[in-house]
Image (cartoon, grey):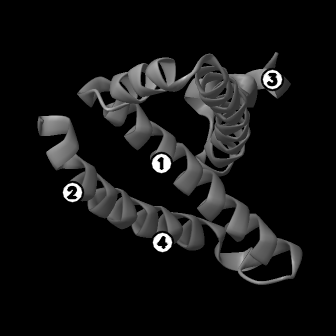
């Protein structure tokens, strides 16, 4: 049982959380893209009135808040993927944690700008 102690999420270190979140955000973004294509294409085929109704629903504050979650997932997946790309070419292998946290800080700053840009739409 001692060998499986690191299999419990409470024992995960930064690298394992980066691995798990990278997979989850990849799956989440892929599922979003499928849903997005289905919703938009169905609304477009159904006519102007239906499309306008869908677009009106997509302008609601709670949908815009979900778009912020999507932006965060895409940013995380993008930045962590860039970090992994650097490792593949031999850059930053010995400084994985600082590189991870530096990229996450850049992502947090970008999220702050995205939130500031979308806040007027959420506030109504």
Q: Residues within 10 Å of mark 1 (few under 14, many from 20)?
A: some
Answer with left or right where residue 79 lies relative to residue 117: right
Left or right of 4? Residue 112 is: left
The residue under label 3 is 4
Query: Could you tell me which residue is drawn at 40 percent across and 66 percent down?
Result: 105
Q: Residue at x 33, y 66 (%)?
A: 109
Mark pair 3, 4: CA separation: 30 Å
For the point 68% across and 28% down, the residue is 41
The numbered dot on residue 116 is: 2
Q: Nearer the viewer, residue 46 or 6?
A: 46
- Name the residue located 73 percent from the left edge and 36 percent from the top edge: 30
Determine whether the residue tagged by mark 2 lies in a helix, strand or loop: helix
As measured in the structure, the alpha-carbon distance from the residue carrying label 1 to the one carrying label 4 is: 18 Å
Q: Are marks 3 and 4 in contact (CB under 8 Å)?
A: no
Q: Quadrant of residue 92?
A: bottom right
Earlier in the chain: of badge 1 and badge 2, it is 1
Q: Gap in Å between the C-alphas at discs 1 and 2?
A: 13 Å
Residue 74, image x, y percentages: 58, 50
Q: Is tag 3's residue or tag 2's residue first in the polypeptide sequence? A: 3
Q: Nearer the viewer, mark 3 or mark 2?
A: 2
Question: Disc 1 or disc 4, which is closer to the eye?
Answer: 1
Given contact means CB atoms under 8 Å apart, are the residues at marks 4 and 2 in contact? Answer: no
Labels 4 and 2: the sequence-earlier one = 4
Which secondary structure lies at badge 3? Answer: helix
Q: Nearer the viewer, mark 4 or mark 2?
A: 2
**Label 3 CA crowd tier, 10 Å (few <14, some 14–19, many 20+):** few
Asked if residue 76 is positioned above or below residue 57 in the image, the reply reads below
């Amino acid at each position: 049982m001692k060998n499986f102690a690191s299999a419990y999420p409470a024992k995960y270190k930064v690298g394992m959380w980066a691995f798990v979140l990278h997979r989850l955000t990849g799956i989440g973004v892929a599922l979003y893209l499928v849903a997005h294509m289905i919703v938009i294409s169905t609304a477009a085929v159904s006519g102007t009135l239906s499309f306008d109704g869908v677009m009106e629903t997509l302008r609601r504050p709670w949908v815009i808040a979900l778009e912020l979650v999507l932006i965060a997932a895409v940013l995380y997946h993008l930045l962590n993927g860039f970090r992994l790309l650097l490792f593949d070419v031999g850059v930053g292998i010995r400084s994985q944690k600082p590189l991870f946290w530096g990229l996450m800080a850049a992502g947090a700053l970008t999220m702050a700008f995205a939130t500031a840009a979308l806040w007027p739409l959420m506030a109504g």
